[in-house]
Amino acid sequence: MIRRYILLLPFLFASACLEESTTALDEKAFTRIYDNDQFDASYYPIDMQQTADGGYLMLGGRRLDNTNFSGIYLLKADRFGNFVKELEVDESFVNPIAQLMSAGTSFKFF
C-alpha cells in the first residue's frame, strides 16, 4: 500500500507545478517586474491607470542627482503587462503626485 503512494507522489508534485495560462485570466491579473539597463537609476511607483486600449499607464518617480526633488517617469504596458515604452520627463519638471486624471483619450497629473 505504501509503495502505491510512493509511486503516486512524483505525479502529484509534477501536476501541482503545472501552470495553465488562458488569455482571459492573463488580461485580468499579471505580475511583472520592469527593469532597464541603468544600474544606478532608482524608480518607485506612484499611480497606475488602465488606458482605452486595455493597456496600463504607470506614473513613477525617479531619483535625480542634482536636486532633492524626484523626477517624473512614465511607463506604458500592454493589456498583458508587457513593456511597450517608457519616458523620463525632463528634469525641469519635478515632484510627481498620485491620481492620474483621465481627460478624453489622454491622462494628466499635477
Image: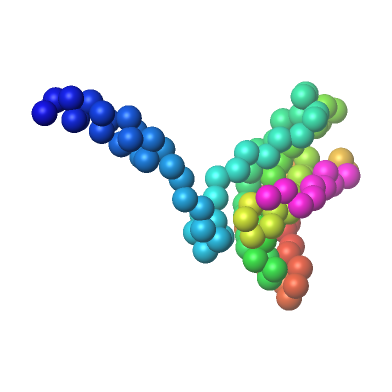
- Residue 88 versus residue 67: which sits nearer the camera? 88
Residue sitting at the far bottom: 104
Any magenta on residue 12?
Answer: no
Q: In the picture shown, does residue 50 fall above or below 94?
A: below
Q: In the picture shown, does residue 59 fall above or below 15?
A: below
Residue at 65% x, 66% y: name it. 54
* Prevalent SS, magenta region: strand
* Quarter occupied by the N terminus: top left
The image quadrant of residue 94 is: top right
Which stretch did the figure color magenta? 82-90
Q: In the picture shown, does residue 97 fall above or below 41?
A: below
Question: In the visual, does 90 lie left or right of 37?
Answer: right
Give how far across and how far down residue 14 sits, in percent.
38, 35
Any magenta on residue 86?
Answer: yes
- Residue 65 versus residue 1: which sits nearer the camera? 1
Give how far across and how far down residue 57 sits, in percent.
69, 56
Give how far across and how far down residue 106 sits, in percent.
76, 68
Residue at 69% x, 57% y: name it. 78
Residue at 18% x, 30% y: name it. 4
- Residue 67 versus residue 74: which sits nearer the camera? 74
- Residue 38 versus residue 18: which sits nearer the camera? 18
Residue at 51% x, 53% y: name it. 21
Task: Confirm whether residue 93 shows in the render.
Answer: no
Give how far across and how far down residue 75 sits, in percent.
74, 49
Q: In the picture shown, does residue 14 fall above or below 20?
A: above
Question: In the visual, does 101 lie left or right of 39?
Answer: left
* Quarter occupied by the C terminus: bottom right
